[in-house]
Amino acid sequence: MTSSSPSRAPRARPGRAGAPRPRRTQAERSAATQTRVLEAALEVLLERGYGGLTTTRVAGRAGVSRGALLHQYPTKEALVVAAVDHVSRCWGDELRTQATALPAAGDRLLRVHELLWAALSGPIFYSALDLWVAGRTDPVLRETLLPFERAFIRGTRALVAEMYGPELASRPRAREAIDIVMHTMRGAALALLLRPERSAAIDLRLLTDIVVGLLAEGEPPP
């Protein structure tokens, strides 16, 4: 008695349970390919840096032809900025989801800062940092990067305010407090580049105490 190969799933037959899924549309296939390209670009950027990233390497990692890649992203600069933008949007969506599970009071600010630090000291920050450094001496990259940089700062600021909640985000010095958090975390993440063993490069409780003090300023006494 022979057995069927476990590596091949049986095809669904008409009239039986488990009807085949409908074929994807051209738009769905194109979107899936685009996502593969952007994720492959980010992987190559993290592994080799901006100087070592080529469209040929990204196309090979994504499993697409170089021509197909260049059809969507005609330049290397457009490709890497789109990749970082894509992953930062996914990051924002994930943080919003995680924030819904945070307590409404108590240590909420500290928990928010813990989530932000985990994200801002990870791959998104380091891939963007590599582009910022390269953009200092590459005018084409710099011009391509500037709109993303402005949008990223505005988006991150709005995301932190959303995670703080409307009551705290409406305080007179909320914008200033959020900027201090972002700049402090960026600086601390830089410190980890050469000394990654310093996992406690930032005192989040101290940072939270500073933010609490700023948010309390200008508020009427209880």
Image (cartoon, helix red, strand yellow):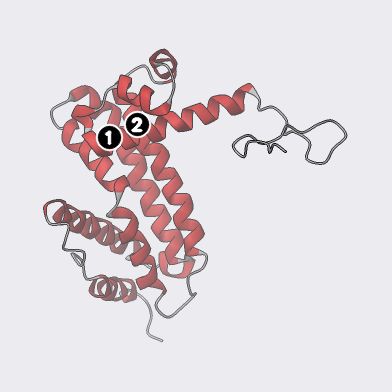
Whole-number angstrom distance, CA of label 2 to CA of label 1: 6 Å
Q: Quadrant of the N terminus?
A: top right
Kindly state the secondary structure of the residue where label 2 is placed. helix
Could you say which is closer to the camera, residue 43 or residue 76?
A: 43
Please provide percent x and percent y for residue 49.
Answer: 21, 34
Residue bearing mark 1: 45
Q: What amino acid is found at the position of numbered circle 1 in the picture?
A: Leu
Return the residue found at the far front: 1
Return the residue found at the far top: 67
Q: Which mark is residue 212?
A: none
Instruction: Say which residue appears at 15% left-offset and 32% top-offset.
Output: 136
Number of numbered tags placed on the structure image: 2
Please provide percent x and percent y for residue 219.
Answer: 37, 76
Instruction: Say which residue appears at 40% left-offset and 32% top-offset.
Output: 38
Residue bearing mark 2: 41
Q: Quadrant of the C terminus?
A: bottom left
From the viewer's perspective, is residue 119 above or below residue 109? above
Q: Residues within 10 Å of mark 2 (few under 14, many from 20)?
A: many
Please provide percent x and percent y for residue 137.
Answer: 13, 28
Dot 2 and dot 1 residues touching (CB under 8 Å): yes
Q: What amino acid is found at the position of numbered circle 2 in the picture?
A: Ala
From the viewer's perspective, is residue 67 above or below residue 76? above
Instruction: Say which residue appears at 20% left-offset and 67% top-offset.
Output: 200
Kindly state the secondary structure of the residue where label 1 is placed. helix
Please provide percent x and percent y for residue 92.
Answer: 43, 50
Q: Residues within 10 Å of mark 1 (few under 14, many from 20)?
A: many
User: Taking the image as drawn, is residue 123 in sight?
Assistant: yes
